[in-house]
Amino acid sequence: MGEATFAPKDLLVSDVPVITRNITIVSGQNLKRGAVLGNITTSDKYTLSASAAADGSQTPALVLATDCDASAGDVVAAAYASGAFDSTKLILGAGHTAATVEAAFRKAGAPLYVRVLK
């Protein structure tokens, strides 16, 4: 059995259970681990969530678990569906703040939490 170790300054913080799932990142993006993703409802693909979007992706839904280069086409990638995240490590789309992302996660009842660490 593996042993977990504390990694200060990591994206993941706290003892909230971590769950990932595979999703499709829509083409035309090069995203880094920690990107806050929204779901494009017509295609069920994900993109960096921007508050001004009107395709469903304006609502933060998941956090990207690995770097993902989808610049040449759609890519299947792992995303966190449960976990707690250091707010300073999240990559936020236009119009989002740590507070608006946390509020969206709470409204959806998602087991995703944004922590402001000192």
Image (cartoon, rainbow, N blue to C red):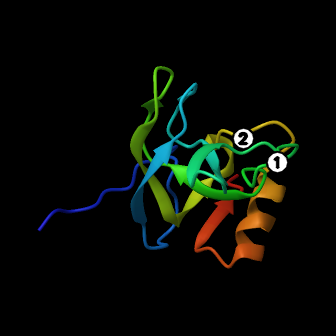
Most distant residue in the left direction: 1
Q: Please name the residue shown 31% across and 56% down the image.
A: 5
Label 2: which secondary element: loop
Image coords of residue 39 (percent x, y): 64, 54
Q: Which residue is mark 1?
A: 97
> Closest to the observer: 11 or 80?
80
> Closest to the observer: 111 or 68?
68
Mark seen at residue 92: 2
Q: Please name the residue shown 11% across and 68% down the image.
A: 1
Q: Is residue 84 above or below residue 31?
A: below
Q: Please name the residue shown 51% across and 41% down the image.
A: 25
Most distant residue in the bottom direction: 109
> Closest to the observer: 113 or 42?
42
Disc 2 residue type? Leu
Image coords of residue 42 (percent x, y): 65, 54
How packed is label 1: few (under 14 Cα within 10 Å), some, or many (20 or more)?
A: some
Q: Please name the residue shown 83% across and 57% down the image.
A: 100
Image coords of residue 72 (percent x, y): 46, 20
Sooner in the amino-acid sequence: mark 1 or mark 2:
2
On screen, residue 90 versus residue 22, left or right, reads right
Disc 1 residue type? Thr
How packed is label 2: few (under 14 Cα within 10 Å), some, or many (20 or more)?
A: many
Q: Are marks 1 and 2 in contact (CB under 8 Å)?
A: yes
Q: Is residue 10 above or below residue 101?
A: above
- Disc 1/disc 2 C-alpha distance (Å): 7 Å
Label 1: which secondary element: loop
The answer to which image quadrant residue 56 occupies is bottom right
Most distant residue in the front direction: 42
Image coords of residue 108 (percent x, y): 71, 74
The answer to which image quadrant residue 89 occupies is top right
